[in-house]
Image: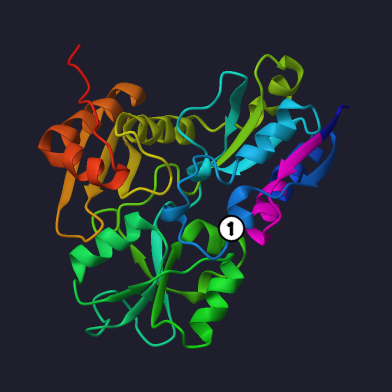
Amino acid sequence: MARLRIGSRGSQLALWQANHIAELLRARGHEVEIEIIKTTGDKITDVPLAKVGTKGMFTKEIEEALAAGRVDLAVHSLKDLPTEIPPSFELAAVTKRDDPRDVLCSRRFASIEALPKAACVGTSSLRRQAQLRALLPDLDIRPLRGNVDTRLAKLEAGEYDAIILAAAGLNRLGKAELIKQFMSAEVMCPAAGQGALAVEVRAGDMDTLERLTFLDDPDARATTVCERALLGRLGGGCQVPIGAFAEMRGRRLHLQAVVASPDGLQVLRESADGDDPLQLGQSVGDALLRRGGKAILEVVYGQEMGLPQPP
């Protein structure tokens, strides 16, 4: 069987993800090796992600290695992958999705509702900050960067009363016992693609593409296409105050989405059902833009946005 080279970031979580895909490929008889690639997001660790302002900050260098033929496939957290993938690449698979929800981790408090006034909560995500401020305006929200272990160590050291993380990352690293509260999408709408892994290959590399087809999960593909369509319609990357969560309800898709001002004073929520993932994501995005999302996002992006024209 073929020898396949995987490109991955070097964090503990990224390597878990790469090794997970590697084991599935080895079970099919492939020889697999992993090449660790440092990305812009890994190099800039002392600045909140929303201020870095670089699309593809966790994927660009890996895609460069893929384009150069140094690796045959790239494994990403789908939420880190920009909505517009260059035409020289394609998504070979979106794997079966882990829990997409955000969670509260704390040494002292059992839930968001139990946090006292001025409690110090750590997150560098504008999406999480905005929804937290809407829930509890008196929280002291402070930046929190680093890998999962680094963030948890800062919590244990007492630097924060609570931190917000993705359930999927804690599950994958075997640290689910640290979770105090799973937050529903109605309370904390997750990032588009959260909980799913993306396997990216060079466009036209049919040999590799065919070997990876078995990894693709139809439900994960449909729900994340829907979420990313909404994100694309809103012009968003992975560090903007936009949340999107799609799920299969019976044979139809249900999408919940949120656009919020970073201060949490304006929170727009929209939901709808549909059959076509792309169309549903775009239509919910259009509804949010019309209801005031355009003005909120223009402030975040620092530029005027054109509203999509009706078909």
* Left or right: where 26 falls relative to 9: right
Q: Is residue 124 above or below residue 62?
A: below
**What scheme was used to colour the molecule?**
rainbow
Q: Viewer-proximal residue, 99 or 228?
A: 228
Instruction: Say whether residue 13 is magenta.
Output: yes
Q: Viewer-proximal residue, 72 or 27?
A: 72
Residue 191, horizontal then vertical, whole percent = 39, 48
**Residue plotted at (36% across, 36% down):** 227
Q: Is residue 186 above or below residue 133?
A: above
Q: Secondary structure at mark 1?
A: loop
**Residue plotted at (52% across, 39% down):** 81
Q: Viewer-proximal residue, 270 or 295?
A: 295
Amino acid at dot 1: Ile
Instruction: Say whether residue 257 is magenta.
Output: no
**Residue plotted at (11% across, 37% down):** 291
Which stretch is magenta? Answer: 5-18
Name the residue carrying label 1.
44
In which quadrant of the rendered image does the N terminus lie?
top right
* Left or right: where 257 falls relative to 203: left
Q: Quadrant of residue 305?
A: top left
Residue closest to the far front: 303
Residue closest to the far left: 291
* Left or right: where 236 falls relative to 42: left
Q: Viewer-proximal residue, 237 or 96?
A: 237
Residue 135, horizontal then vertical, whole percent = 20, 67
Residue 272, horizontal then vertical, whole percent = 20, 34
* Left or right: where 250 falls relative to 294: right
Q: Quadrant of residue 129?
A: bottom left
